[in-house]
Amino acid sequence: MDNSSKPTVKPTITVRPVTISRSTTNPFASIDKKRVAAYARVSTDDEEQLNSYEAQVDFYTQQIQSNENWIFVEVYADEGISGTRTKGRDDFNRMVADALDGKIDLIITKSVSRFARNTVDSLVTVRKLKEKDVEVYFEKENIYTMDSKGELLITIMSSLAQEESRSISENVTWGQRKRMQDGKVSMAYKRFLGYCKGEDGTPQIVEAEAEVIRQIYAMFLNGKTYREIASYLTECGISTPGGKPVWSVSTVQSILKNEKYAGNAVLQKKFTVDFLTKKVKVNEGEVPQYFVENSHSAIVSAETFKLAQGEIQRRKAIGKRLSGSGLFVCKIVCGDCDGFYGSKVWHSNTEHRCVIWQCNHKYKGEDTCRTPHLTEDEIKNRFCVGFQSISS
């Protein structure tokens, strides 16, 4: 059969349009308007920046609500947060989570630097959103992430923003180190007990708080443990440096080790390793450290502070949990085994009850320690005799 005689029929092509979203599986017909959110951020908490923060929130709320083709979702805003990393930016992370859950179609933000100053974070976030058909619009740069050139422009702008952040960080660090070289001392006054910032910018003593500091040092040098001091301050209703009602052992230790209470200052004890991660490291010689003597008024004397440091080291060297139940605890050493003397109660339920001190290991080994037990009065008398011989 000759097929050439058959008429030629052109194929008919009918396009069936996309009806549902690949990311949300919702029918397009059910979403007549774009669900729009905005993101605002300021990186410091001073008054000028807070006004900018409030202005951004108000502006975006009105802008979205006034557009009849948009449905206002929310203005996500982080206050006083750095943009160099997404960690800690609660509203930013919440916004991204809501977008990935299909609650947002478009995100509006002022600029790439407001969104993120970290190139990697910016690109990763934008790509995650694009996979879910969520677009981001950067007003200042006039960039839409769904645009074919969007990612290239974002990469360039994010890199510039990151370098700007690096430059700012280096300038701030330089300024801080210059202040240290000049011997200028700064404190976190809101969390520093005993001092406030004076009119001339130098630390000034707050006498009521200073009395608490002196009491802590006195209790410690009189044999009280860190925990006993913390419990006492809590029971007395004295607030911690951070304004909390309950004192911790670490807070007491920090006060006893802080040279600023003796009127001196060690500057740059820690430093920021990376401006992006904000990781802080203890300075072990990587960067200069500055010791400023007599930089401000002291709350405790140099002698008291020195005695406290010696007592801290002594207790640390003991290598065991210290009890502060008595003045002579962990201070009397057995001449046979080098163990510490401890208090024991004899005849506790009789009229002959008394407290004696003897080696804690006297009967624990194969050989009994030959050192005698002592009464508390004998120890006090011997202490007085020894003290008088030294002072005379």
Image: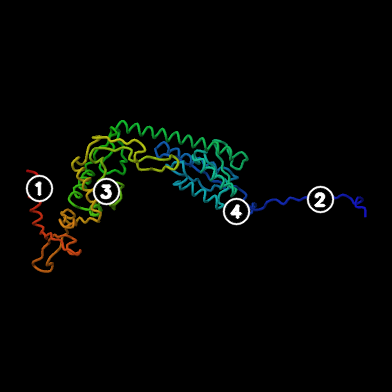
Question: Which residue bears the numbered disc 4?
Answer: 24
Q: Earlier in the sequence, mark 3 or mark 1?
A: 3
Q: Hey, what amino acid is under mark 1?
A: Phe
The label nearer to you, 3 versus 1, is 1
Question: Which residue bears the numbered disc 1?
Answer: 387
Outermost residue, front side: 367
Whole-number angstrom distance, CA of label 2 to CA of label 1: 114 Å
Question: Which residue bears the numbered disc 3?
Answer: 253
Q: Could you tell me which secondary element the residue under label 3 belongs to?
A: helix
Q: Earlier in the sequence, mark 4 or mark 2?
A: 2
Q: Hey, what amino acid is under mark 2?
A: Pro
Q: Earlier in the sequence, mark 2 or mark 1?
A: 2
Whole-number angstrom distance, CA of label 3 to CA of label 1: 29 Å
In the rendered structure, find residue 11 and report the number of the disc placed on it: 2
In the rendered structure, find residue 203 and report the number of the disc placed on it: none
Say whether marks 1 and 4 touch (CB < 8 Å). Answer: no
Q: Earlier in the sequence, mark 3 or mark 2?
A: 2
